[in-house]
Image (spheres, helix red, strand yellow):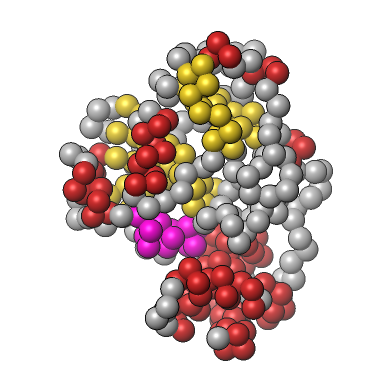
Amino acid sequence: MKPYPSLPNLDAPDAPSFEGSVWIRELVVGEALRFGVAEGGYLRFAAGQRTFTEDPPLRLRRAVRHVERSFDVEALLREASHPAELVFYGVATVRDGIEYDWARLPPFLGFDAWDGGRERWLPNDAVDRAFEGLGLAGVNAFEKELPVRHFYPGRYEVPDSAWYDGPAAGIVVRDSHGTRAVRRNPEARPSGDAGPDLPTDPEALATAVVTADLVERLAADLGDGATFDALLQTTLEESFRLCHAVAEGWDDAEMRTFRGTTAERLREFV
């Protein structure tokens, strides 16, 4: 799948020039994730140079499962002439230094789409319609269809985030032709702030993270009739989303301990 292009700095001397109108989206911190529909009708994912259809990295499992459950593959197969030529891009919203409102922030937010058949990026408004129509949320836009003649990069201040009480991590500007640039906001990540202190012991971490509120939220997401095993799997994936910096260093025994303690916590709340 086509990798996403690197984003030049909006404030650099050689920053690109925009044409037509621009959309200004929030830069949401996380990990880039892209996906498409294979010829067999199943979703395939990629992050960086790695492509996978199963066993995604721990930190990406919640985003991958969320896309698999939410994305309307059948609608895409009905409506797109060449669905296998489309690639969808977004961010897996994993904890990475900014304390978003995790109860509101979806595990995946889309921001772009590539039509390989026509060798072009979808227009901004078409990207929004595609994600919404196919069951996924898109990254929020601070400005839509802002004429370039009214956009002054040097005067544009990064707004507050839509996902936590504080300034956004930055903005991504994209014009109607696919030209992009990014401004990162150092005020969004104070020096030395790496998020909450998380216990490294698996049992202590499960006790701290798997709360009644978390379980209630995930159970509501799954809906009535969800099995205990399904809730356990989703709870583990959500925990990895929030605690991947700790969990990805565990061995098999520590992972079993975490899974067992998580199951015990679930039994307390369901």
Residue situated furthest top in the rendering: 149
Residue 242: where, in percent of width, then height?
A: 62, 62
Is any part of residue 185 visible from this angle?
A: yes
Residue 251: name its quadrant.
Answer: bottom right
| 6 relative position to 38: left or right | right
Q: State whether the magenta stretch is mostly helix, strand or loop.
A: helix
Residue at position x 61%, y 24% from top? 9
Is 14 located above or below residue 133 in the figure? above
Residue situated furthest right in the rendering: 191
Is 150 inside the magenta-drawn segment? Answer: no
Is any part of residue 47 visible from this angle?
A: no
Residue 71: where, in percent of width, then height?
A: 35, 55
Q: How many marks?
A: 0
Residue 198: name its quadrant.
Answer: bottom right
Is 80 located above or below residue 269 in the figure? above
Residue 45 or residue 215, whichever sits in front: 215
Residue 186 or residue 74, whichever sits in front: 74
**Magenta residues?**
60-71
Is 1 located above or below residue 245 in the figure? above
Residue at position x 64%, y 64% from top? 243
Residue at position x 64%, y 18% from top? 153
| 42 relative position to 221: left or right | left
The quadrant in which the C terminus is found is: bottom right
Residue 54 or residue 84, whichever sits in front: 84
The quadrant in which the N terminus is found is: top left
Residue 266: where, in percent of width, then height?
A: 57, 84
Residue at position x 61%, y 22% from top? 10
| 229 relative position to 76: left or right | right
